[in-house]
Amino acid sequence: MKSVPWRRLWRVSAGLIGAASVALAAISAHGMEGQAQQWAAKASHFALLHAAVLLALSLGRGAVGPWLAAGGGLLLLGILLFCGSLTGMALWGWPVTLVTPTGGLCFIIGWLALGLSGITEYSGPEV
């Protein structure tokens, strides 16, 4: 698997999601109250955290193995589903509550895949 398409996707996504996260945090802090504010703040927090991880993944070198690709892809999907659904509920009242746990599951499995990539795909010098 080539590294450039995955790394480019992760870097572009990290930039866009990072900017959207900061904007959502500002909207949450200055224009929302109650449950909507909590949902938006949580979405912003999780999106910004995982955008930073995507940025870190994009800075790697060499080929992207299957576990690393799966991990990064699942984190990106988790951002879209988990954070997107919380944002939709907070801003527009979308009834997407069943999507949120699916996004959370994507985060969990994505992190596990990243861990597996460190075990199965490491090709550095032996110590």
Image: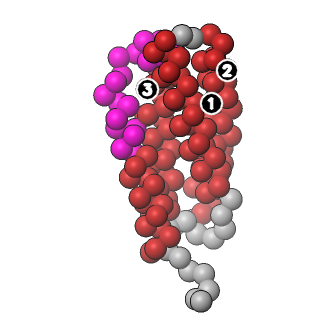
Q: Compare residues 91 and 26 and report the one nearer the observer.
A: 26
Protein image colouring: secondary structure
* Residue at (41% x, 58% y) in the render: 112
Q: Secondary structure at mark 3?
A: helix
Q: Magenta span has 101?
A: yes
Q: How many circles with numbers are drawn on the protein? A: 3
Residue picked out by circle 1: 21
Whether residue 51 is situated above or below residue 30 in the rendered picture:
below
Q: Which residues are magenta?
A: 89-106
Q: Position of residue 17 (x, y in %)?
A: 62, 36
Residue placed most toward the observer, 54 or 4: 54
Q: Residue drawn 63% across and 47% down?
A: 52
Quadrant where the image shows the C terminus: bottom right
> Helix or strand or loop: what does disc 2 sit on?
helix
At label 1, counting other C-alpha atoms closer than 10 Å, the crowd grade (few under 14, some 14-19, many 20 or more) is: many
**x 53%, y 76%: residue:** 122
Q: Amino acid at mark 3?
A: Ser
Mark 3 touches mark 1? (CB < 8 Å): no
Q: Nearer the viewer, mark 2 or mark 3?
A: 2
Q: Main secondary structure of the magenta part?
A: helix
**Residue 70 or residue 111, whichever sits in front:** 111
Residue 94 part of the magenta segment: yes
Q: Position of residue 108 (x, y in %)?
A: 40, 49
Q: Earlier in the sequence, mark 2 or mark 1?
A: 1
Task: Check disc 2 and give the amino acid type.
Answer: Ala
Residue in the image at 65% along x and 50% along y: 55
Q: Name the residue tied to disc 2.
A: 26
Secondary structure category for the residue under label 1:
helix
Instruction: From the image, tell me which residue sits under label 3.
Output: 85
Q: CA distance from mark 2 to mark 1?
A: 9 Å
Task: Measuring from the top left, give residue 57's x and y in whole percent.
Answer: 61, 57
Q: Is residue 56 above or below residue 3?
A: above
